[in-house]
Amino acid sequence: MKRLNVVLACVVSCFLLTSAKAAESPEYLIQSCKEVVGIYAQRDQKRLAAGLTTSVSEALRAGYCMGVVEEYRRHKSCYTRDWFTQATRISEQPLPLTSRIRVSELLEMSCGY
């Protein structure tokens, strides 16, 4: 049980460090949303195999996208019907765009405003 707590503490601390840095990075949000869209596409194609073939880092990036989008939707109204549609729109943004846009602007654009 102690070993599990140590592992969980390491994972959470790594995630917190990454998410603090990523909070200002539209590129990281785009890549994270590409990850979640890819995982869901695999899930639809292979059923349960997607969960077995997803690495921890892929899952963390996907969770970051889901968390950012859900938190945005909790505080702002959005024209998209669900978080996955919004994540898909974010994932379709070209990476060169990231040098000219903030995360908040990216989230607004993905809402269909």
Image (cartoon, rainbow, N blue to C red):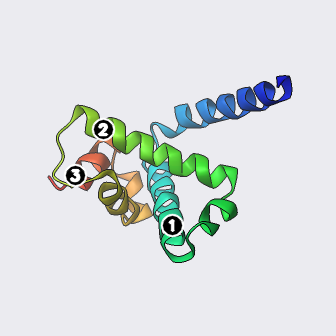
At x 64%, y 68%, the residue is 49
**Residue 17, position as x, y percentages in the image:** 62, 31
Asked if residue 10 lies left or right of residue 42, the reply is right
At x 50%, y 43%, the residue is 64
* Circle 3 residue: 111
Judged from this view, the residue extending furthest toward the right is: 3
Q: Are marks 2 and 3 in contact (CB under 8 Å)?
A: yes
Which amino acid lies under the numbered mark 3 shown in the image of this protein?
Cys
**Residue 81, position as x, y percentages in the image:** 21, 55
Q: Residues within 10 Å of mark 3 (few under 14, many from 20)?
A: many
Q: Quadrant of residue 73?
A: top left
Q: Quadrant of residue 18?
A: top right
Asked if residue 78 lies left or right of residue 34, the reply is left
**Residue 101, position as x, y percentages in the image:** 33, 49
Which amino acid lies under the numbered mark 1 shown in the image of this protein?
Gly
At mark 2, the secondary structure is helix
Q: Are marks 1 and 3 in contact (CB under 8 Å)?
A: no
Q: Residues within 10 Å of mark 1 (few under 14, many from 20)?
A: some
- Which of the pair 46/64 is nearer the observer? 46
Whichever of callouts 2 and 1 sits on the residue coming sooner in the sequence is 1
* Circle 2 residue: 72
Q: Which mark is residue 85?
A: none
